[in-house]
Image (tube, coloured by chain):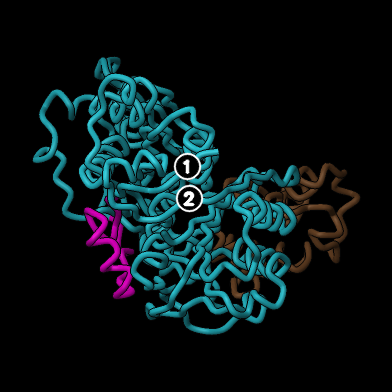
Chain colours: A brown, B cyan
Amino acid sequence: MSVKDKVIEIIAEQAVLEPSDISMDSTLESLGIDSLGLVESIFAIEEAFDISIPFNANEPEKSDFDISSVATIISGIEKLVEG
Amino acid sequence: MKRVVITGAGTINALGHDVPQTLAAMREGHCGIGELDMRDVDRLGVQIGAQVQGFEPEVIFNRQQLSLYDRFTQFALVAAREALAQAGLEFSGELSAKSGVVLGNSGGGMQTLDENYRTVYEDGKNRVHPFVVPKLMNNAAASHISMEFNLKGPSFTVASACASSNHAMAQAFQMVRSGMSPVMITGGAESMLCFGGVKAWEGLRVMSKDACRPFSATRNGMVQGEGAGVFVFEEMDHAKARGAEILAEVVGFAMTSDAADIVMPSRQGASRAISGALADAKLNREDVGYINAHGTGTAANDKTECSAVADVFGPHADKLMISSTKSMHGHLIGGTGAVELLACIMALRDGIIAPTIGYEEADPECAMDVVPNEAREANVDVALSNAFAFGGLNAVMALKKV
């Protein structure tokens, strides 16, 4: 499974949706994922790829990790996985 | 209804091993936060905290006591001894039968849990010390205080996360105010700064890795502390009859529940607790000169708290002072409201307002007089202490100068 498919699977599970319902320009908010759902998704992604994601819930905008859409999350994770 | 006064105070926390040291540190804007000193700290993502330094339990307690006292119980007893010594009370007969201890605590004996989980899971041993249960139970500290001071009335422990101490003190206040008990020992204790405790908090991603800067635009999270604060709440006539020194009067409280979210705070829940405390104390909002904020230094708390204060106080919100001493002693979780009550007592009694240190840049969403970085002299008649817990449980205390 590609990084993209795996991330979409994790986000879909968190949003209680089918992976096919997740589009690349979806935002977490539009998928109904709140702040608690976000940190849970990040945890699941870290576990799935054995990576550490630099994310502080107090200053999401300052994080190098861009959570503004599914696409930016996937590209951020791809960089971390390759890194 | 009886009037309730505070006739004794005790503490141990990262700012000091007693009340005078702690108040001096608050006046100086001293920061008790530093690098954590604990086993496996290199495996932690968050490596700072407000630990109690230079504490030597083996000097204070004997071998038998140490085998029964988790660190949070040790803290509670140290603080209780100071508070009871100041109050000058001895408990016997009727007074003993009616007086008790209500303490706040969230995690119980976390050090004991951590050590013994290591023993069975990591070291693979199949035997633990026989006192693990009496050592780790949340009520251990309250029970040991009752035993040491012969308190035979109502004693128990209140757990409401970060509001535990305020809920506990509110309960003790009610017991004295209603005439049920002439004296109640109350406050809270916590010792969560162990590997498992910090690791658990790390998971929420709300912890700062460098400093606690409440209300500052540059804030990036909370920092955990540890310690205890213990007070003697006494019926005013009882205290006056024996010529006791009165530190402050407890005049009201309110508790509310957000009934909304398990971690995100609610503006309405917080403002209902603040206005409820004013109503219970029969105070006008203009009477309040100082609020010791919950002020955790997280984005969620600080914005919500400031908007709740603005809702309740209207134009007076610009005139009152509100500071978060967590910037200095860290967040003591279940013990935090107790240590923070000391800042309220200092404001009323000494006319000194403890600062919010680490304040770097104004945040338009927290546009209040947060007493940035330096303590201030001011004449304050009424002070509030806010506590807003995970789980949406809020408790606000109101204190008045005597």
Q: Position of residue B359 (x, y in %)?
A: 46, 79
Determine which residue is flagged by label 1.
Answer: B169
Determine which residue is flagged by label 2.
Answer: B250
- Point 59% across, 71% down: residue: A63
Horizontally, residue A70 falls left or right of residue B128, namely: right
Q: Position of residue B342 (x, y in %)?
A: 37, 57
Q: Is residue A34 above or below residue B71?
A: below
Of the numbered discs 2 and 1, the one sitting upstream in the chain is 1
Q: Mark 2 touching mark 1, by CB under 8 A?
A: yes
The question of residue B281 being in magenta is answered with no
Where disc 1 sits, the SS reads helix
Residue B85 can be seen, yes or no: yes
Residue B188 can be seen, yes or no: no
Say what amino acid the circle numbered 1 marks.
Answer: Met
Q: Are the residues under marks 2 and 1 on the same chain?
A: yes
- Point 53% across, 69% down: residue: B220
User: How many other residues sit within 10 Å of disc 2, few (<14), some (14-19) or many (≥20)?
Assistant: many
Q: Position of residue B87 (x, y in %)?
A: 26, 44
Residue at the right extreme, as displayed: A21
Q: Position of residue B393 (x, y in %)?
A: 63, 44
